[in-house]
Image (spheres, helix red, strand yellow):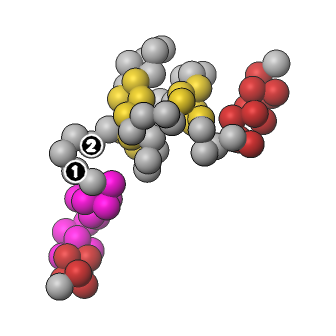
Amino acid sequence: LRMALDDYVTAHEDRFQFCITPDCPQVLSKEDRVAVCSCCQVSICTVCGVEEHERLSCQQYRASRLPPNEMRNTIIEKF
């Protein structure tokens, strides 16, 4: 049964995703921008698939996670 669910979620990844918490079996709907796992209570950004990042766009969040020199280069490239 678990394999069938895994296959279904993978085939419909535009609508569903697995929880990002290791060993959490929950499947989440991508209906809203933020999904809260009913098993482990983590809030997930369904756009980029990471822990929810309030007040930051996905692009800003990714840039904030870069090492300092890469972040500087990313910012400079935009201007």
- Residue at numbered disc 2: 53
- From the viewer's perspective, tell me whether residue 67 is left or right of residue 42: left
The overriding secondary structure of the stretch rendered in magenta is: helix
Residue at 80 percent of width and 28 percent of height: 3
- Residue at numbered disc 1: 56
> Eyeballing the image, is 63 above or below 22?
below
Residue reaching furthest front? 31
Residue at 17 percent of width and 85 percent of height: 79
- Residues at marks 2 and 1, CA–CA distance in whole angstroms: 6 Å
- Dividing the picture into quadrants, the one containing residue 34 is top left
Q: Which residues are magenta?
A: 58-72
**Which x, y percent locates residue 43?**
36, 29
User: Was residue 68 drawn as part of the magenta stretch in this picture?
Assistant: yes
> Eyeballing the image, is 73 above or below 28?
below
Q: Is residue 9 visible?
A: yes
Residue 79: which disc?
Answer: none
- From the viewer's perspective, tell me whether residue 62 is left or right of residue 17: left
Label 1 Cα crowd, 10 Å radius (few <14 / some 14-19 / many 20+): few
Residue at 78 percent of width and 36 percent of height: 7
